[in-house]
Amino acid sequence: MSAPLHELGFLEAADALAQKTVSSAELTAALLDRSEKLEPALNSLTWFDREAALAQARAADAARAAGDARPFLGVPIAIKDLLNVKGQPCTAGSNILKGYVAPYDATVIARLRAAGCVFVSRTNTDEFAMGGSTETSAYGPTRNPWDVARVPGGSSGGSAAAVAARLAPAALASDTGGSIRQPAAFCGVTGFKPTYGRVPRYGCTAFASSLDQVGPISRSVEDAAAVYQLIAGLDPRDSTTSPRPVEDVLPAVRAARDLKGLKLGLPKEYFVEGLDPEIEQLTRAAVDQCRALGAEIVDVELPHSRYGIACYYILAPAEASANLARYDGVRYGFRAEAGDLQEMYEQTRARGFGAEVKRRVILGTYVLSSGFHDAYYLRAQKVRTLIRGDFERAFARCDAILGPVTPTPAFRVGEKTSDPVQMYLGDVFTVNVNLAGICGLSVPCGFTAAGLPAGLHVVGPAFREDLALKIGAAYQHATEWHRKRPVDPQGGRP
Amino acid sequence: MAMKFSENADRMDARYVAGLARMALSDAEAAQLQGQLDDILAFIGELKQLDVSGVEATDVATEARNAWREDVPEAGLARDVALANAPLARHEQFAVPKVIE
């Protein structure tokens, strides 16, 4: 085989394993070797256990030798450190969960396990997925493989950086306000947030339950589609999951060559002041490429877009303040010793949570408190209805919506940590997709003059994953951006 | 408990609200968070510009309705497994500091 093993994508690895040109143990070992070499510079992983991963890989190889022909048997995948994998730590990037060992598999993990996948490593995340840079992790910031002085985005920055740096062919991640798509854009990889209700969250550490969704980060849309299909579908343990059957989208995604017959909407609200000129130019070039592939580009309006961030930063902290009430030092995780119960709670949470989590818990508690609930929380829920309505009207005029994923390329580590509002504004193009509960794909669409990746956002209607993925796949068939790879970073962290 | 919110709805006492969330704050933390939260509240306050009269609230964007299952017992976590992550367990129970004086 000519290309090094760590270059194999998710589907390529499955093919190589099926043809027995490589074993899962060889592939897994190659990824672990590479992780050991590059992690001092990247810090994209919170945990890996060579012996445990290799034991899983050898078991897959033995099963294959005995005639087991499951298509993804032995394919390695990295997992965001927010999803429970039985017997592995699960910290959510927080000190309050240090030492916690997952007693069960999340549903998405159980499904990957049933498919035969090898859990090769756990990826860094902003604490409880609250952040857009992976800087709020208790394990320290992850670095962007394209420029280690810059952030990889977040909260799934570890997953995006690890996939970009070829530490894994694909990774699971989660997206509450852009946490899959934004880091995918910053790291030049593909990220997919399915429709709310498409993928079960049982066993995914909860942040904001009306918004959280699990999805893949990979190096191609085909690989994202393959992982998505493995994890999607009804789960009796997550009552928000849809009973709709998950159709096999892979043949259509692999065959996608053009965009003929499709109307793609371009919202004027996405090309406004504050959008980096290079990002705008790269996005417009990608839109031109879609037009050249046969799509009809139509103007659409999303008039309430500008209220999305304010709406999100009321609803998500409110839900987080309720979800994080469970971290009280009683059943799991860190406990501060104290004389009485109340002080134990207060000191456990004071010492266990980092600054961003505290900000959001306080904000969420405030907007839910008596006297302020209607002015903030209820009003935000009504604005959410207006934002959903915008998309419903837009999708009456077009099949899917195109735009930038992020207003800027990856920023420098430390650049926005002292100014939360500036950090939150980075979610401007992604949060509305979560608020509306629809699906969104980020595909690489070029590089700035400084060599930083940009992402094209393909937003599809609810349960039209097939459409978003086909559009992304046709775009990738015509372009090479997703094949570009960063130069391996040398040495330790700057 | 005395009302400690300021008269102005866009001002809040960070330490008081942190107390409601059972979270102690140091003086330095309270001062820094207060300033940042004031900025965030000013920012999210822009929703007040919108007329939402007559608009229904969206609590969750899903087509799913209440989920039911057969009312039969299922195996949960075994007691020793559930207790394995406890900071302190005694007599097969989670142990906490004394509540009653």
Image (cartoon, coloured by chain):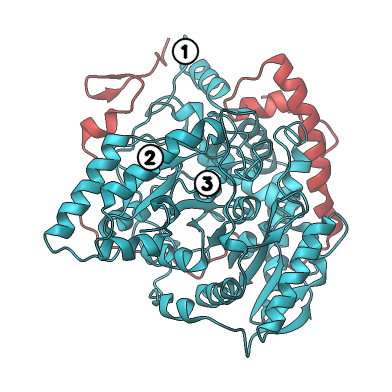
Crowding at dot 3, Cα within 10 Å, few <14 / some 14-19 / many 20+, comes out as: many
Residue at 69% across / 47% down in the picture? Answer: A314
Q: Chain of mark 3?
A: A
Q: State if disc 3 and disc 1 touch (CB < 8 Å).
A: no
| Disc 3 to disc 2, C-alpha distance | 12 Å
Residue A333: name its quadrant. top left
- Residue A340 tag number: 1
Q: Residue at x 61, y 84 (%)?
A: A259
Which mark is first along the chain, 2 or 3? 2
Q: Chain of mark 1?
A: A
Q: On the image, which quarter does residue B71 sit in?
A: bottom left
The chain drawn in red is: B
Disc 3, SS: loop
Front-most of residues A159 and A368: A159
Q: Which residue is mark 3?
A: A165
Chain A colour as displayed: cyan
Expressed as whole percent of the image width and height from the top left, the position of residue A115 reads 28, 60
**Which residue, given by chain and number where applicable, does mark 2 sit on?**
A32
Residue at image coords 26%, 41%: A54
Q: Secondary structure at mark 1?
A: loop
User: Is residue A103 toward the left or the right of residue A278 in the image?
Assistant: left
Q: Which residue occupies the foreground of this view, A166 or B9?
A: A166
Badge 2 amino acid? Leu
Q: Disc 2 and disc 1: Cα gap in Å?
A: 46 Å
Above or below A275: residue A70: below
- Residue at figure coordinates x 52%, y 30% from the top left: A40
